[in-house]
Amino acid sequence: MIRSEFRKVGTVRSPWLLLAAGPLIVVAGITGLIQSGGNVHDPAVQSRALAHVGLAALFTLLFGIMAVAGEYRQGTITDTFLSFPGRGRVITAKLATYGLVGAAAGLVSSAVAIAVTAAWWAAKGGSFHLTAGDTWLTLGGGVAANVAFAVIGVGVGALIRNFVAAVAAALAWIALVEGIVGQIAGPGLARWLPLPASEALGRTSISATSQLLPQWGGGLVLLGYAAAFAAAAVVTTLRRDVT
Amino acid sequence: MAEVEVRDLTKTFGRVTAVQGLSFTVPAGKVTGFLGPNGAGKTTTLRMMLGLVRPSAGEALIGGVPYRRLTRPRRCVGALLEATGFHPGRRARDHLRVLAAACDLPDRRVDEVLGQVDLASSAHRRVREFSLGMRQRLGLAAALLGDPQVLLLDEPANGLDPAGIAWLRGLLRGLADEGRTVVVASHVLSEVAQTADHVVIVNEGQLRFAGPLRELGETSGALESAFLNLTVVPR
């Protein structure tokens, strides 16, 4: 079943374009950090550069959504359920497959981040050390965020089967809704929301939330969200008619 | 024998009753026409047979077992549904390779069915370049992939040119002669009259007739007049 899922990904171009956007955003983000005056002699800046790997998780989220909602859009979900009438297993296979692809995407983004950061550091006369500061914690958190968001994407795609609506809902949540909810809830509660949790995990800082959970706490919270979305995806998919 | 049996099948969508207390048996080794006007509940019934739509009541059995409990469904049942989709950017052969991986069949089998539906020369083209008739052939290839004993086909002649329709007729005949159960849902009566041995006629979700085609009369127009008698509601 997982082999069939990998063949689905491997035989069309759109997922690869989407996944290629992750490393591109890493390159652009690190370049932007340096151009805006990032100090290459500061180990903390090196970590901030590498933390762009966590940002690339936006694309694994869209990728996960595409894996399920895309199948409803193309109508290939009918064939998938004809092959595997046990639909819970279909969703489980997708969670596993796209979690793995998310991990691979995170690793590629990490390699790109190391290369680009090292190149900028060399160009600006700084000294780049893989052992400096919390390099490995930052990269590891970034990869974990890529996996978690791919899994959440599969869940969102299974819950909102309309592809365009699912992508719009995910982007609106990230860009707007979560900020508003966070303001209403206050910073003490806002840090439990998915985006601040992923920031804590990937050691990024994109929103204005100042009080983040510790990295491991962010990881656990995100794991909880991923599990909740995965469970909801399985339960709703079992019951619905495919017409 | 892989008979298809429908027992007291009912499906309601909200307030609309799409299928109501439908019972019939489809014999193996014959081509069975599944007929009814638009909206009669044919597609919903096929989808219930395939475990895609959950019946409100009753059951549909394939060789005595509901579709969802078949251990290797694609090896038992091949289906062609109108809404069965293709990713437009996927090549025809890759579409079938995805399905082959799903039922543990080798790529060699993919090439066999591509040849069987006469698509071998277009196997490496992306589906977006395909005409409706070619998509229909690709859908038939997918249905045949697992060499199933039961075929459930919804409007299989849709989009085929006259030569394609003649080819399809021969294909269905051959499959039934091998002892398989072949169900063809359609509202093109002239086509069914030439192909089917057995017919099931539904209207408004209810059974109107199930039996050998010849019981409806021997003449070429007999099926049409019987169909209209059975399905047109007097106003």
Image (cartoon, rainbow, N blue to C red):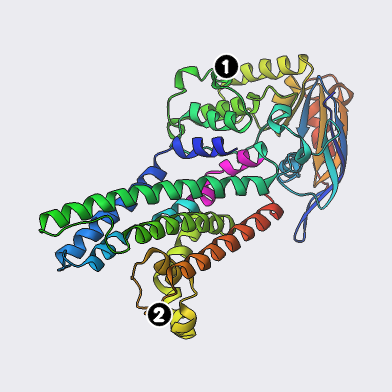
Write the start and end of the magenta stretch as one range: A66-81
Determine if marks 2 and 1 fall on one subunit. no
Against A122, is B84 above or below?
Answer: above
Mark 2, other Cα within 10 Å: few <14 / some 14–19 / many ≥20: few
Secondary structure mainly formed by the magenta segment: helix
Amino acid type, label 2: Gln
Against B7, is B164 above or below?
Answer: above
**Chain letter of the residue carrying label 2:** A
x, y percentage for residue A78? 62, 42
- Disc 2: which residue: A211
- Disc 1: which residue: B112
Q: Nearer the viewer, residue B14 or B149?
A: B149
- Secondary structure at numbered mark 1: helix
Which mark, residue A223?
none
Instruction: Residue B118: tell me if it is visible.
Output: yes
> Quadrant location of residue A187?
bottom left
Q: Are the residues tagged 2 and 1 within 8 Å (C-beta)?
A: no
Q: Residue at x 50, y 35 (%)?
A: A7
Residue A139 magenta-drawn? Answer: no
**Nearest to viewer (mark 2 / mark 1):** 2
Q: Nearer the viewer, residue A40 or A78?
A: A40
x, y percentage for residue B94? 49, 29
Instruction: Residue A18: tell me if it is visible.
Output: no
**Chain letter of the residue carrying label 1:** B
x, y percentage for residue A83? 65, 36
Amino acid type, label 1: Glu
Residue A69 magenta-drawn? Answer: yes
